[in-house]
Image: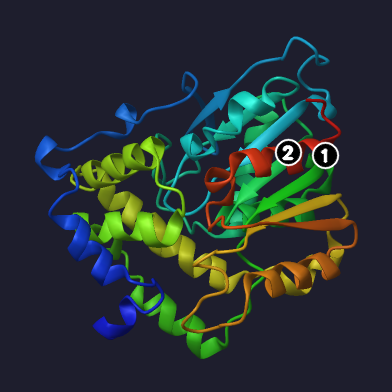
Amino acid sequence: MLPRALRFAAVPGLLALAAMQGACAPRYAAKGPMQPAEIWSPLPVQHVTVHGIDIAYLDSGDPPDAPPSGNSASTIVLIHGLSSYSSFWEYQIPHLARHHRVLALDLPGFGQSGHPDAPYTPPWYAEIVADWMAAVWAPRAVVFGHSMGGQIAMTLALTHPERVEKLVLAAPAGIERFSPGTGQFMKSWWTETRAMEAGEDEIRANFVATVFNHHDDGVERLIEERVRMGHSPSFAATSVAVSRSIAGMIDFPVWNRLPGIAAPTLIVFGSDDHLIPNPVFTGGTTRSIGEEAARRIPDSELVILPGAGHTVHHDDPRGFNAAVDRFLGDGS
């Protein structure tokens, strides 16, 4: 197991932050467990069965100024990252829905979707997403992916290019290379019970110091949901999904396959991303990771948003949405 001192080395000031905030922050565990169905959502949650798995998703429907749904130019698919769900796109869904049909799913294992006994690897998720798109009458779309969702989106573009009109990658995982020893080390630490072991102070510190650089009411809501869902019996299955997803990202990188992506691609990173590159095992700069990815993906461009962190689309929604509008050719 990773020594305790190293557990927090990847998060600047994590222990100090937890100590400072622990006494004054709201205490959510005392409010009792929260079931996944109680998660806040920017749109009504719908359900469809794919491969025998219940998939929860959001659908904005057709915007007033767009062609009917099913037209690839008017459809957007949003794929969230590790340990999150569709509401992490809360600043993008209403913005994009002005000109597009917007679909956002909860990946199996997370949010309000089912929790099957599955591998949870990027290739497995890509197959689920491809068949879910068909099931909701979105055969081809502009596909967005954040972090792990970015790795899934790239895998989808490689294995099902007919599904992907364009790619928008927000701080994508899968393009950072780890040595075999490092990868094995990380997988051995992220056991299938590890997510269940995180206390409220650690969760808060992780959200505030690592995942988000801009702490607003939405982040506070997500902290409450994570803490309270962690006390629900159903969270044990999510903890398994987290562990297997991390192993899957390590085992199925897309670095060597990036030149095979045919879809025009926008890559967006925050300049102050605390997760990519991994500060313990990789080092270097986020910009260098993004620039190398942009060089390897044939038709791609890179945008770096100053001051934004790993959840770049939340930390700077105005800058992120403006970059997306330019890329898609949307008006103001």
Q: Residue at x 80, y 12 (%)?
A: 65
What kind of residue is marked 1? Arg
* Rendering coords of residue 22 (x, y %): 17, 56
* Horizontal relation, residue 123 to residue 3: left or right: right
Q: Please say if 240 is above or below 104.
A: below
Query: Number of callouts in the render?
Result: 2
Few, some or many residues within 10 Å of mark 2 (<14, 14–19, 20+): some
Q: Secondary structure at mark 1?
A: helix
What kind of residue is marked 2? Ala
Q: Are marks 2 and 1 in contact (CB under 8 Å)?
A: yes
Q: Secondary structure at mark 2?
A: helix
Q: Mark 1 highlights which residue?
A: 326
Work out which quarter of the rendered image holds the N terminus and state it: bottom left
Q: Which mark is residue 276?
A: none
* Horizontal relation, residue 201 to residue 123: left or right: left
Q: Mark 2 highlights which residue?
A: 322
* Rendering coords of residue 208 (x, y %): 36, 55
Q: Residue at x 78, y 22 (%)?
A: 70
Real-space Cα separation, disc 2 to disc 1, in angstroms: 6 Å
* Horizontal relation, residue 1 to residue 28: left or right: right
Q: Please say if 145 is above or below 14.
A: above
Quarter of the figure with residue 294 = bottom right
Furthest residue toward left: 30
Work out which quarter of the rendered image holds the C terminus and state it: top right
Q: Is residue 65 visible?
A: yes
Q: Residue at x 26, y 41 (%)?
A: 224
